[in-house]
């Protein structure tokens, strides 16, 4: 046995465990309002921050101590002051920021709550259905997607598709967001293009109900709790979008074929999926490790629970392009003009 390797992996394991407990502390800070207050005032002593946020001092002190040790906040021993750098606040305190990661403070606890069930499926087959992850997972997905969609969808992602925005502005056409979740993308498009009819489809009834509750006053928007195989093909859509959806489907190939069937002859399909390679050797980094974890504990298992393919989140560009060809799409174009560390964008046409 190599003693240096033992010591080195011990340090590495402590880093892994520290990351998990830090997410737990951030989740408490998020739910209690501590993160929001810290973002507003910038910093202070534990006593000042507890008083200002209306929280118990001892909890605030221990949470901030852990976050200081993890490098989330900065601590000055002389003044006993904790400060949240503005750059860090973008990730944990500012829900309007496209860098906001608050969705992980809901999603990760939700998927970890089903570890026993995933272990059972690992032994016996099958999976854990989406519904088992509960309201916290729906909230986590919503909070993960909403910040970037709000900032970038209308101003950057759709303009990256040549000639699309003028068509949507002119109206008289139809758009579908498949796997719409709580409805953010569909609502944003309906507001930006009032003369275009927008439809959001999702298999989760709970998610669709949330979407409907947010869409009041938008006469050009409708939501339906439909599986991708049930999406209407008449009249067809000028634009179909999916945002981190295809890898979750029980039958991704059939889903892509159905999407192609719903497209008008001059229609385009904008697909966003995790930004990975298709080979494990191309994905041996911390970002991919997180993605494989979320995939095994949520994306893949809920697909397998439906008797599906369990494609997994890290299927990558090469497999996406191959599947697009199998589904009958005439072209598959990565949108390189959209720079995103976590997501890849592809433009497909009939």
Image: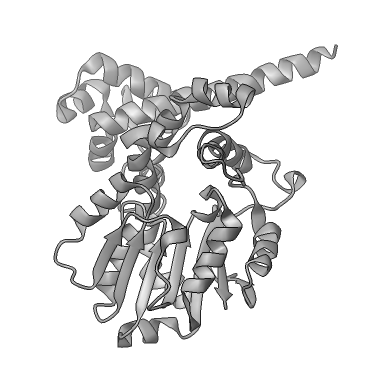
Q: Residue furthest right?
A: 1
Residue 332: % across, % down: 63, 72
Q: Nearer the viewer, residue 25 or 65?
A: 25
In the rendered image, which quarter is residue 175 located in?
A: bottom left
Exactly how many numbered labels are in the figure? 0
Quarter that holds the N terminus: top right
Q: Position of residue 89 (x, y in %)?
A: 35, 43
Identity of the residue drawn at 40% across and 25% down = 24
Give the residue drawn at x 40%, y 33%. Answer: 133
Splitting the image into 4 quarters, where does residue 199 fall?
A: bottom left
Looking at the image, residue 218 sits to the left or right of residue 4; the answer is left
How far across and down, in percent of the image, does residue 261 sit?
A: 51, 72
Q: Is residue 36 visible?
A: yes
Q: Nearer the viewer, residue 79 or 129?
A: 129
**Residue pictured at 35% horizontal, 77% vertical:** 174
Does residue 350 lie above or below 140 as drawn? Answer: below
Left or right: 289 with respect to 9? left
Vertical placement of residue 337 versus 104, above or below: below
Q: Is 229 placed above or below 53 here?
A: below
Q: Position of residue 188 (x, y in %)?
A: 30, 66
* Observer able to see residue 340: no
User: Which residue is rendered at x = 47% and y = 59% of the image?
Assistant: 229
- Residue 222 placement: quadrant: bottom left
Direction from residue 273 to residue 216 in the image, left or right: left
- Name the colour scheme: one colour
Query: Where, quadrant-wise, is the C terminus in this rendering?
Result: bottom right
**On the picture, is 106 further left or further right than 217?**
right
Vertical arrangement, residue 77 with respect to residue 137, above or below: above
């Amino acid at each position: 046995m190599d003693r240096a390797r033992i010591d080195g992996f011990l340090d590495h394991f402590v880093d892994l465990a520290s990351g998990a407990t830090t997410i737990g502390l951030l989740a408490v800070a998020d739910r209690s309002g501590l993160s929001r207050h810290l973002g507003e005032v910038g910093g202070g002593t534990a006593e000042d921050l507890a008083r200002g946020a209306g929280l118990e001092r001892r909890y605030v002190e221990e949470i901030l101590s852990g976050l200081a040790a993890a490098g989330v906040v900065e601590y000055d021993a002389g003044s006993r002051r904790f400060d949240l750098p503005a750059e860090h606040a973008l990730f944990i305190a500012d829900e309007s920021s496209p860098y906001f990661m608050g969705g992980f403070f809901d999603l990760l606890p939700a998927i970890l709550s089903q570890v026993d069930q995933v272990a059972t499926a690992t032994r016996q087959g099958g999976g854990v259905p989406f519904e088992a992850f509960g309201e916290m997972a729906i909230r986590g997905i919503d909070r993960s997607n909403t910040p970037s969609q709000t900032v970038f969808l209308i101003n950057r992602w759709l303009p990256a598709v040549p000639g699309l925005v003028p068509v949507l502005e002119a109206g008289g056409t139809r758009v579908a967001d498949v796997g719409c979740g709580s409805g953010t993308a569909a609502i944003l498009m309906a507001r930006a293009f009032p003369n275009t009819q927008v439809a959001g489809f999702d298999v989760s009834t709970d998610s669709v109900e949330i979407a409907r509750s947010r869409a009041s006053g938008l006469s050009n928007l409708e939501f339906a709790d439909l599986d991708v195989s049930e999406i209407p093909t008449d009249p067809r859509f000028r634009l179909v979008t999916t945002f981190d959806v295809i890898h979750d489907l029980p039958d991704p190939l059939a889903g892509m074929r159905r999407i192609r069937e719903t497209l008008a002859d001059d229609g385009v399909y904008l697909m966003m999926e995790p930004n990975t390679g298709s080979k494990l050797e191309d994905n041996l980094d911390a970002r991919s490790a997180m993605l494989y974890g979320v995939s095994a504990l949520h994306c893949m298992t809920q697909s397998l629970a439906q008797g599906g393919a369990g494609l997994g989140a890290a299927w990558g560009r090469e497999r996406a392009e191959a599947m697009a060809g199998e589904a009958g799409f005439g072209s598959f174009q990565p949108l390189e003009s959209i720079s995103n560390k976590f997501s890849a964008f592809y433009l497909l046409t009939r």
